[in-house]
Image (spheres, rainbow, N blue to C red):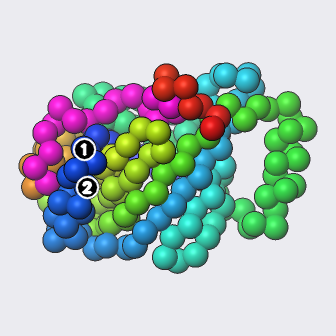
Amino acid sequence: MGLEIEFKAFIDSNRVEEVKKKLESLFVYNGYVKKTDEYFSSLPNGEPLFRIRIQNDEKGSKILITSKPNKSKESGLEFNIENEFEVSFDQLSNLRHFITGLNLYLCRKKYKEGYDFSGFFDSSNLHLELLNVKYLGWFLEVEIISLNGLEPKKEDLDVINNIFKNILDKLDIGYEHIVSTGYYKMLAAAGHGLS
């Protein structure tokens, strides 16, 4: 469990290769990644309680179960307390049966794939992804893993904002491209919640 501080910014499809090259000059490229997310709720169209993620990347495939019980947003930044654990593929069927037995509903699906990066910027450890979210387009996701070697705190908002602004400046992406709405809400609004 840990605090994540992140943002996502919309990237015009004709700028994807340019942004990718700039990211490669600033960070370590970890390879191509594909993620399929299924969100579950106590109501058919309710707020998600947790997700199952099937992820395929350069290291192989894995299944992650994630809940974010404490989420907040401020100035386009997202603050999440994330609980996450991995299950093996041979447990997936039992997991789905368990979820059905709890009378939980599959309320959203999300597919995204693209390029994974990591590295240090302004003394902070970052994880970045340039992803195509099915039905929505391309986005840059940037997450602070640590701030000066410490778990980031919400009080560090000015420092964090400066780090994020500096990254956007280096990539020639306007701060106005930051998106504060969650993907699953955007997908539902676009009529693609379960497709």
Is residue 143 inside the magenta stretch? no
Give the labeled residue for mark 1: 12
Q: Secondary structure at mark 1?
A: loop
Q: Amino acid at mark 1?
A: Asp
The correct choice, above or below, for 56 with respect to 188 in the image is below
Q: Residue furthest bottom?
A: 59
**What residue is shown at x 17% (from left), y 60% (from top)?**
18
Q: Is residue 62 left or right of residue 28?
A: right
Q: Amino acid at mark 2?
A: Val
Give the labeled residue for mark 2: 16
Are discs 2 and 1 less than 8 Å apart at CB? Answer: yes
Q: Secondary structure at mark 2?
A: helix
Q: Residues within 10 Å of mark 2 (few under 14, many from 20)?
A: some
Q: Residues within 10 Å of mark 1 (few under 14, many from 20)?
A: few
Q: Quadrant of residue 181?
A: top left
**Numbered range of the magenta stretch:** 171-187
The correct choice, above or below, for 184 with respect to 64 in the image is above
Residue 149's x, y, as percent? 29, 62
Question: Can I make out residue 150 in this image?
Answer: no
Quadrant of the image containing the C terminus: top right
Is residue 182 inside the magenta stretch? yes
Q: Quadrant of residue 42?
A: top right
**What residue is shown at x 10% (from left), y 55% (from top)?**
170
| CA gap, disc 2 and disc 1 | 7 Å
Q: Is residue 45 left or right of residue 176?
A: right
Residue 191's x, y, as percent? 55, 25
Residue in the foreground of this view, choosing between 65 and 59: 59
Question: Can I make out residue 43 in this image?
Answer: yes
Residue 2's x, y, as percent? 47, 50
Residue 22's x, y, as percent? 16, 64
**What residue is shown at x 33% (from left), y 56% (from top)?**
130
The correct choice, above or below, for 171 with respect to 30 in the image is above
